[in-house]
Amino acid sequence: MARTKKVGTTGRYGARYGATIRKRVRKLEEKMKMPHRCPRCRIKAIKRKSVGVWVCKKCGFIFSGGAYIPLTDAGKMVVRTARRTHESKTTS
Ligand SMILES: [Zn+2]
């Protein structure tokens, strides 16, 4: 493969789109390619299938998540709120 110097995975864009944007993309892609843990089998085998769709290579579990990382801070808030709403409904 061609040398990508310090630009990493965004080297494929060449000189296009501007340095700042490429840097931002690189940060996201690095997070995206990091090993992510499956919420079902706890094994780090999560791959991004499409925007916001994640699939576990181990158990085949498909779930929705953030666009670039499986679990975003905003996503965690939603889960927490949903759980609390559910609990208050079932206990009353
Ligand atoms: Zn799994």
Image (cartoon, grey):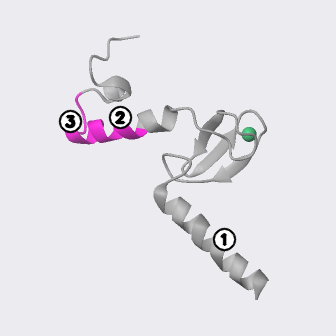
In the image, 21 versus 77, the foreground residue is 77
Q: Quadrant of residue 12?
A: top left
Q: Earlier in the sequence, mark 3 or mark 2?
A: 3
Residue at position x 56%, y 52% from top? 52
Q: Mark 2: which secondary structure?
A: helix
Whether 44 is drawn above or below 62: the answer is above
Q: Which label lies toward us, 3 or 2?
A: 2
In the image, 65 versus 41, the foreground residue is 41
Q: Which label lies toward us, 3 or 1?
A: 1
On whether ligand 1 comes within 8 Å of the CB at mark 1, the answer is no
Q: Which mark is residue 19?
A: 3
Q: Which mark is residue 26?
A: 2
Residue at position x 24%, y 34% from top? 16
Q: Residue furthest bottom?
A: 92
Can see residue 18? Answer: no
Q: Position of residue 5 (x, y in %)?
A: 27, 16
Amino acid of disc 1: Arg
Residue 23 within the segment the image draws in magenta: yes
Residue at position x 56%, y 67% from top? 78
On whether ligand 1 comes within 8 Å of the CB at mark 3, the answer is no
Q: Residue furthest front?
A: 91
List the residue tagged with mark 1: 83
Residue 7 within the segment the image draws in magenta: no
Q: Residues within 10 Å of mark 3 (few under 14, many from 20)?
A: few
Q: Mark 1: which secondary structure?
A: helix
* For residue 75, side relative to residue 19 (left or right): right
Q: Residues within 10 Å of mark 2 (few under 14, many from 20)?
A: some
Q: Which residues are magenta?
A: 15-28
Q: Quadrant of residue 6?
A: top left
Q: Position of residue 19 (x, y in %)?
A: 20, 35
Amino acid of disc 2: Arg
Alpha-carbon distance for marks 3 and 2?
10 Å
